[in-house]
Amino acid sequence: MKDASAHRYAIIGAGPSGLAAARALQKAGIAFDGYEASRGVGGLWDIENPRSTMYESAHLISSRTTTEFTEFPMRTKADYPGHRELITYFRDFADHFGLTEHFRFDTKVTSLEPTDDGGWMLRADASDDTVERRYAGVILANGTLAEPNIPVFRGTFTGELLHTAVYKSATQLTGRRVLIIGAGNSGCDIAVDAVHHAASVEMSVRRGYYFVPRYLFGKPSDTLNQGRPLPARIKQFVDTRVLRAFTGDPVRFGFPKPDYKIYESHPIVNTLILGHLGQGDLRIVPDVDRFDGRTVHFRDGSSGEYDTVVLATGYKLDYPFVDRAALEWSGMAPRLFLNTFTPTFNGLYVMGMIEASGIGWQGRYEQAELIAAYLTALEHHPERAAAFRARVTGEPWPDLTGGYNYLGLERMAYYVNKDAYRGAVRTATRALLTDAAPRRPRRRRSAARKKATA
Ligand SMILES: Cc1cc2nc3c(=O)[nH]c(=O)nc-3n(C[C@H](O)[C@H](O)[C@H](O)COP(=O)(O)OP(=O)(O)OC[C@H]3O[C@@H](n4cnc5c(N)ncnc54)[C@H](O)[C@@H]3O)c2cc1C
């Protein structure tokens, strides 16, 4: 009798990436089981998920039409819906396509170990049970924004120190003197929340940022120029001038001048913060030098007294249930072909380990289609799968930077340009679905520039 686990796969996580994987495998007729630690689908968009880093005021940063799954448009007309609409969207998506019943909820994967026959033994804890099951391969879709990155500071802060991961609502900051460290998208959202509740708000930044308005020329800004990407240098030239015209120079509000060009780091899609700076509701302060009780000393010799320090210092990749060697970690991230395939093709596939401006859930779905195409080839066209592996191990990897010279920061370790990435993924998928050899990729993804340090 044929072993039922020979071609059965596991998916870890029922967030947007896990759902994308489930849908792609379903369409390809590949058997799978999903495991989700939380109570339902939707990943971090379910604010009740204990691992969720969502907060009450959060809305999409990328606009609805560039973010949604193409085959399942959102029902809302809002351009930037909030997290409550989004969790409903994911539940509807999973129910509509019959994906929900493939997942086992409240079941946390605790370990993955290779088996002697080339598969993986998955172990998981449920509230009243433990699971141990062998799979042909496993798709890791456990999210990238859950494990806080907590920098080490000199000295000790004796007030409240919290990371954005545990920030839920502005009421947490009521009446407090707040210092936010870092001005990423979450840090800026929280600063905008805080000005309505806190006694005072200051934001400590190390470098300058580019602030993109949600709307340009009356349209969601990321919908302009869709499908016709300009060469990097031209886009940088044009967008720098457009931003200067719309948002002015953030240096006026106390931000340092960026020492890099636009799109060489993740832009901040928030101009409300500039409005509040202009109103004097918050103040930009320099990089932190050290803590001393409730006092924070800054690099320029100034200092301030605070009740709460919010670390908006980002997240670290974390795949705690599997040996790091199996994912070929190199520095801050696993080294994976198209951020998906281990070069040894050991049966582990990573979904959603892509940080990019505007890749959306459709971009993640295309990544899932590539995995499904490879798994289909493994079973039905082994020669295509072998040709794919030969290209991955024997040829330069595609350049995923899109010509942008990304900053050499920890958080940029798995950053890609969405157009370059989606183009490379589609090319690879096409090659797996046909016998045609793809065009040669241009060059290996260049190491991120090391001109700035974290
Ligand atoms: C405030 C905020 C705003 C954002 N805005 C946008 C935006 O506008 N556009 C955009 O494209 N992206 C945005 N994002 C990024 C967001 O990460 C993605 O939209 C998306 O949620 C990523 O999906 P995912 O499935 O990869 O990860 P997640 O949504 O994090 O889902 C991972 C799932 O895996 C589960 N899990 C983890 N470990 C285990 C385990 N051991 N066993 C079983 N299950 C496990 C978790 O419970 C979770 O449900 C935003 C993120 C935040 C925090």
Image (cartoon, rainbow, N blue to C red):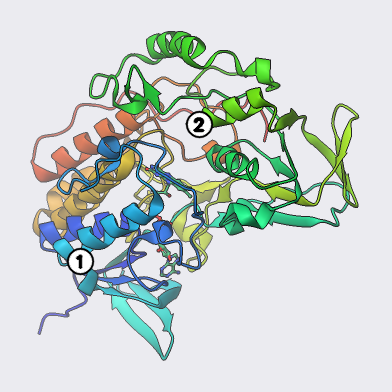
Estimate the x, y position of residue 306 in percent, counting from the top left: 82, 47
Front in this rendered view, residue 92 or 448: 92
Front in this rendered view, residue 122 or 264: 264
Which amino acid does the dot numbered 2 rest on?
A: Asn
Secondary structure under the numbered disc 1 in the rendered image: loop
According to the image, label 2 marks what residue?
270
- Mark 1 or mark 2, which has the lower sequence index? 1
Where residue 107 sits, quadrant-wise, is: bottom left
Q: Is residue 284 left or right of residue 130?
A: right
Residue 52 visible in the shown view: yes
Q: Residue at x 39, y 52 (%)?
A: 83
Does any atom of ligand 1 lie closer than 8 Å to the CB of label 1?
no
Residue 313 visible in the shown view: no
Q: Residue at x 44, y 86 (%)?
A: 127
Estimate the x, y position of residue 20 in percent, counting from the top left: 25, 54
Q: Is residue 439 left or right of residue 131?
A: left
| For residue 19, above or below residue 442 | below
Which amino acid does the dot numbered 1 rest on?
A: Leu
Separation of residues labelled 1 and 2 (CA atoms): 34 Å
| For residue 86, above or below residue 448 | below
Categorize mark 2 by other alpha carbons within 10 Å: few (<14), some (14-19), many (20+): many
The residue lying furthest to the bottom in this view is 128
User: Quick one: quadrant of the N terminus?
Assistant: bottom left
Q: Which mark is residue 99?
A: 1
Where residue 423 sits, quadrant-wise, is: top left
Front in this rendered view, residue 400 or 149: 149
Q: Is residue 180 left or right of residue 348?
A: right
Q: Is residue 269 left or right of residue 315?
A: left
Q: Residue at x 46, y 27 (%)?
A: 446
Estimate the x, y position of residue 214 in percent, counting from the top left: 41, 29
